[in-house]
Amino acid sequence: MKKSALLILAFVLCTAVYAQSIVPTIKGNSVITYTYTLNGQDLPLTLTFNSLGDPIKIDWSIEGIGSGNYEMSSKALAEGKGVTMKAPDPDQLTKLPTYETVACISRSAYAEMVKNMAFEYDDLKFTVTKDSTGEVKMGDKTLDVYHAVATNGKGEMWILNNPDFPLICKTKDNAQGTDLMLVSIQ
């Protein structure tokens, strides 16, 4: 009887822990807010995904820098090889090349990451780790993310476990000199 009670308790606790890990959906009109770190200064960054068609249309706004628009091709989301982390010129439409994403890795890089626990992006090789620093929270909810570390030890990404839109939730020591920390998705 005690073994059954302990087994049921363990199952309930595991289910509760698993249920707390969430995977938000990114869709048209999603508003994603980050803390954008540039030269040691934290700035609020807002990305509004107006359309997830082809092209994907994204409005951006960084307090103190300005605002503008990105266009990312559906080909970039499908098979891009790098991510832009730099703020484009304000009040401009920035059309990204077909190999470049913004705020996410490509679906093909995600599939490689899941299959091999490693992938290449921005000419850097990343390996997925299972360490305790892999937790990312949005409010009081823990996000279901993969924690990837550059094999040269310079750069980390936390990527949402979402094959449709593998959102970058957090970066640390990014090679482009900027970092992101997800605050909210609405």
Image (spheres, grey):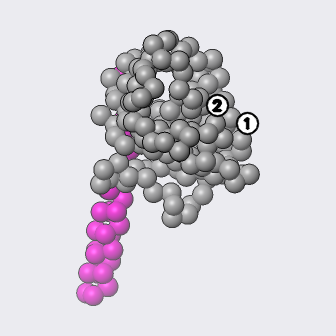
Q: Are marks 1 and 2 in contact (CB under 8 Å)?
A: yes
Q: Which residues are magenta?
A: 1-28
Distance between the Cα atoms at labels 1 and 2? 8 Å
Q: Nearer the viewer, residue 70 or 134?
A: 70
Q: Position of residue 36 (x, y in %)?
A: 47, 38
From the image, which quarter does the N terminus lie in?
bottom left
Q: Residue at x 50, y 12 (%)?
A: 93
Residue in the picture at 31% in, 69% down: 13
Which kind of residue does numbered mark 2 sit on? Gly
Q: Which mark is residue 123?
A: 1
32 in relation to 75, above or below: below
Q: Estimate how packed mark 1 is, as few (under 14), some (14 to 19) or many (20 or more) residues with alpha carbons within 10 Å.
A: few
Q: Which mark is residue 160?
A: none
At x 63% / y 18%, what residue is drawn? 98
The residue that mark 2 highlights is 82
Viewer-nearest residue: 48 or 91: 91
* Residue at (28% x, 68% y) in the render: 12
Task: Report helix, strand or loop for mark 2.
Answer: strand
